[in-house]
């Protein structure tokens, strides 16, 4: 059973973004502000770091042009951080699968990399591709047409969601089974490709978004949470339905300040510093996605619940990020972790696959966190970025303890003189 669950988790996470990440700088009323500290977004095999100056560093694999350097598979891979050419006004980013995204200071978006599902959003509005039509990767950062006023991006590698300044949400990619305004046939059972941004039907008043594996979360202005998409493990908060094409409110959640979606499960951070989890526990015996918590709502003989419940002993939390290793940042700058650690991504100095209960990574003075399939990223208060785990599907460059990948000097790199945003 354990091996089966691990294989299922790995397959799903390879598809994810997991963005994979929860990035901490608060968005203003208009567009996202330039970050005070570096922001990290990473997939299983590549990533990007947005510097306070607006410069973007990229690293990892490049088979589908996901590094944005102008060529597919050239270079094939980079362990070193490389400046993304021509982009000097980035304020945030997202990465998942083999695709990359940058949010610019003016609220527009650049996209590049893999595009087979239309996940770059570069198609003609209103024109859907044929089922047999091949959409090629794009190795150069390219503006997403018709998309402006963006505050936040989230992706699972196949679909993308963008939160706009007016509190509405746009989606594109393999999300035709979501109900989308102006997309004929959207909302049906099987997903199809939507290669252009379209509004998620009926969703307004949104404060933040997160993308999981075939489902999404929206944190509302009133502190409640809505979800839509797959509900195989109760991840959209319903005990009965298998999916929902439109956002539905998750019962039992209020005073929420942050959300993070994972592979069939989700987390919510409440204003009081506690964390709620629900969806797939990961394993009937270990319940590693729930830090081993055996809440009465979990289905007997199974490992899922549609009812959010608290993880005991986890308090004073200021940020969360769902990945293979789940991470919670505490107010004192330390971190707690739980979940899968076979990639050493918890930063414990050991690679025990399923350490029981809450773990404490070897870090301190942390200001921001991000997770992916096989790595966890810790942004220190001085701007230094460390990583634990590996960003390849092997143990090459494996960091069992958090290791510096961006120095303080690199974090302070300015944009080129008289740079006007670049692309």
Image (cartoon, rainbow, N blue to C red):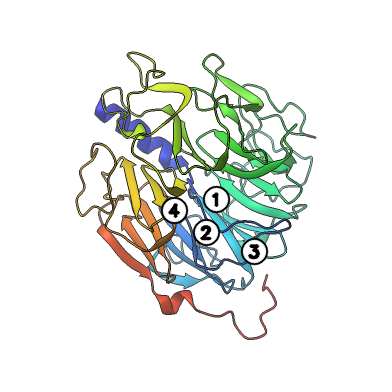
Pointer 3 or 1: first along the chain: 3
**Quadrant in which the N terminus is drawn:** top left
Q: Is residue 381 above or below residue 297?
A: below
Q: Is residue 292 left or right of residue 187?
A: left
Callout in the foreground (1, 4): 4
- Crowding near pointer 1: few (<14 within 10 Å), some, many (20+)? many
Question: Regarding mark 2 in the picture, which secondary structure is present there?
Answer: loop
- Residue in front for this viewpoint, 235 or 343: 235
Which of the two marks, 3 or 1, is nearer to us in this view?
Answer: 3
Spot the residue most to the bottom: 417
Left or right for 329, reference 420: left
Circle on res. 308? none
- Which type of secondary structure does the marked residue at label 4 adopt? strand
C-alpha separation, residue under disc 2 versus residue under disc 1: 7 Å
The residue under label 1 is 114
Question: Which residue is at the front of the view, 269 or 187?
Answer: 269
Instruction: State if disc 3 and disc 2 touch (CB < 8 Å).
Output: no
**Is mark 2 in CB contact (under 8 Å) with mark 1?**
yes
Marks 2 & 4, CB-CB < 8 Å contact: no
State the residue at coordinates (31%, 60%): 363
Residue under numbered circle 4: 370
| Quadrant the C terminus occupies | bottom right
Q: Which residue is mark 2?
A: 65
How far across and down, in percent of the image, does residue 147 sit? 74, 52
Say which of marks 2 and 3 sits in front: 3
Q: Which residue is mark 3?
A: 33
Q: Residues within 10 Å of mark 2 (few under 14, many from 20)?
A: many
CA gap, disc 1 to disc 4?
22 Å
Point out the frontmost of discs 3 and 4: 3
């Amino acid at each position: 059973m354990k091996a089966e669950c691990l294989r299922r988790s790995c397959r799903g996470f390879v598809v994810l973004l997991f963005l994979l990440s929860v990035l901490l700088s608060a968005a203003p009323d208009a567009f996202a502000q330039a970050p005070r500290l570096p922001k990290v977004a990473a997939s299983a095999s590549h990533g990007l770091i947005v510097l306070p100056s607006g410069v973007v560093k990229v690293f990892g694999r490049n088979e589908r042009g996901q590094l944005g350097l102008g060529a597919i598979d050239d270079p094939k891979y980079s362990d070193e951080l490389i400046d993304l050419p021509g982009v000097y006004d980035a304020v945030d980013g997202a990465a998942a699968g083999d695709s990359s995204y940058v949010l610019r200071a003016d609220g527009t978006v650049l996209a590049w990399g893999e595009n087979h599902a239309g996940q770059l959003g570069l198609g003609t509005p209103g024109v859907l591709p044929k089922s047999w039509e091949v959409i090629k990767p794009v190795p150069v950062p390219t503006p997403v047409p018709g998309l402006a006023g963006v505050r936040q991006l989230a992706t699972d590698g196949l679909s993308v969601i963008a939160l706009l300044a007016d509190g509405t949400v746009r989606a594109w990619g393999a999300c035709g089974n979501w109900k989308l305004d102006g997309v004929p046939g959207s909302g049906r059972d099987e997903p199809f490709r939507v290669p252009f941004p379209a509004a998620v039907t009926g969703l307004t008043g949104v404060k933040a978004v997160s993308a999981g594996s075939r489902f999404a979360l929206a944190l509302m202005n009133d502190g409640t949470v809505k979800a839509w998409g797959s509900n195989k493990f109760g991840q959209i908060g319903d005990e009965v339905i298998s999916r929902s094409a439109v956002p539905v409110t998750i019962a039992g959640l209020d005073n929420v300040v942050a959300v993070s979606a994972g592979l069939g499960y989700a987390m919510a951070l409440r204003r009081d510093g506690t964390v709620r989890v629900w969806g797939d526990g990961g394993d009937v015996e270990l319940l590693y996605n729930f830090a081993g918590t055996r809440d009465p709502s979990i289905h007997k003989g199974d490992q899922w619940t549609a009812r959010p419940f608290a993880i005991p002993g986890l308090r004073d939390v200021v940020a969360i990020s769902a990945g293979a290793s789940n991470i919670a940042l505490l107010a004192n700058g330390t971190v707690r972790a739980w979940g899968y650690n076979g990639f050493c991504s918890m930063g414990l100095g050991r690679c025990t696959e399923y350490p029981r209960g809450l773990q404490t990574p070897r870090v301190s003075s942390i200001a921001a966190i991000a997770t992916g399939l096989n790595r966890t990223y810790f942004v220190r208060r001085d701007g230094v970025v460390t990583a634990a785990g590996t960003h390849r599907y092997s143990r090459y460059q494996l960091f069992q303890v958090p290791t510096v990948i961006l120095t303080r000097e690199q974090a302070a790199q300015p944009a080129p003189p008289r740079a006007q945003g670049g692309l």
